Image (cartoon, rainbow, N blue to C red):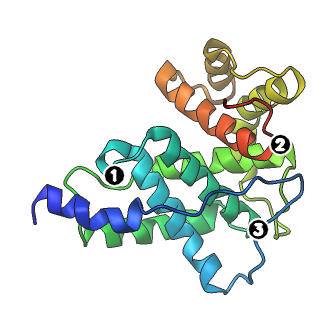
Amino acid sequence: MCCGARVAALRPVLACPRPACKAMTRHSSRCRALPTSPLVRELPTQVAETFYVVQDPALFNTSYSDALLRFVDAAILAYECGMNEDSLRHELKVYKQSLEQQVAPPGMALNEDGCMLGAKIVWITLMETRSVRRWAAYNPVTDDTLHAWCGFVSMIVDSYLNRQMSWFPIERLQLELQAMQDLCVPPHDVVEWARIVYTVLEKVHPQFSKE
């Protein structure tokens, strides 16, 4: 099967139009299903599928902004329904294996680490803002993850909510990552991670008109 045919086969699954995301109010939750329900069991696949599109939006005839919004929405719903790092990591491995056995275009494997990190940033942002109810008694991320990323996320959240800043200086975020994780990260990676935080904030605490 040629690459074009493979992409065409993937599009109905990965880039089909999804229902418009409803605005979320403080402490709202869309998760009304039991952990064993089909809806909840499909959540890891939705997170993986939407991130797969984020990796190369043009391949699926969509924009990066729309692809990221779908990924964030899937990660928020996974948070609400009680998913955590361990459960998502396991399901991502299963999804990646099934993708490799089917129609994935050459060089388009799922980036498990990128998907995991994106979901964790979404979840820590929700923990920081306390904006949606989580139907679980345990945290979605480990203490180590929270320690590594809480500062990065909280700097953006504080500036957005308390100082109405629509963007945060990338250099300061780079310094935070270097101090907390000993990471020397290029600006484009920091921008991508910061954009995930802002996409979450725009959903749960919209402050700026898009007109």
Residue for point 16% across, 62% down: 5
Work out whether residue 116 or residue 53 is closer to the camera in this orientation and state it: 53
Q: Residue furthest left?
A: 2
Q: Which residue is mark 2?
A: 128
Q: Which residue is mark 1?
A: 60
Three-letter amino acid code at the position of disc 2: Glu
Neighbour tally class for label 2: few under 14, some 14-19, many 20 plus, Cα within 10 Å: some
Secondary element at image label 3:
loop
Q: Position of residue 90 (x, y in %)?
A: 52, 69
Q: Position of residue 24 (x, y in %)?
A: 79, 54
Secondary element at image label 1:
helix
Mark 2–mark 3 distance (CA, rounded to whole Å): 19 Å
In the image, residue 108 above or below residue 2: above
Quadrant for residue 44, please give it.
Answer: bottom right
Mark 1–mark 2 distance (CA, rounded to whole Å): 33 Å
Q: Is residue 4 visible?
A: yes
Q: Earlier in the sequence, mark 1 or mark 3?
A: 3
Residue for point 67% across, 86% down: 36
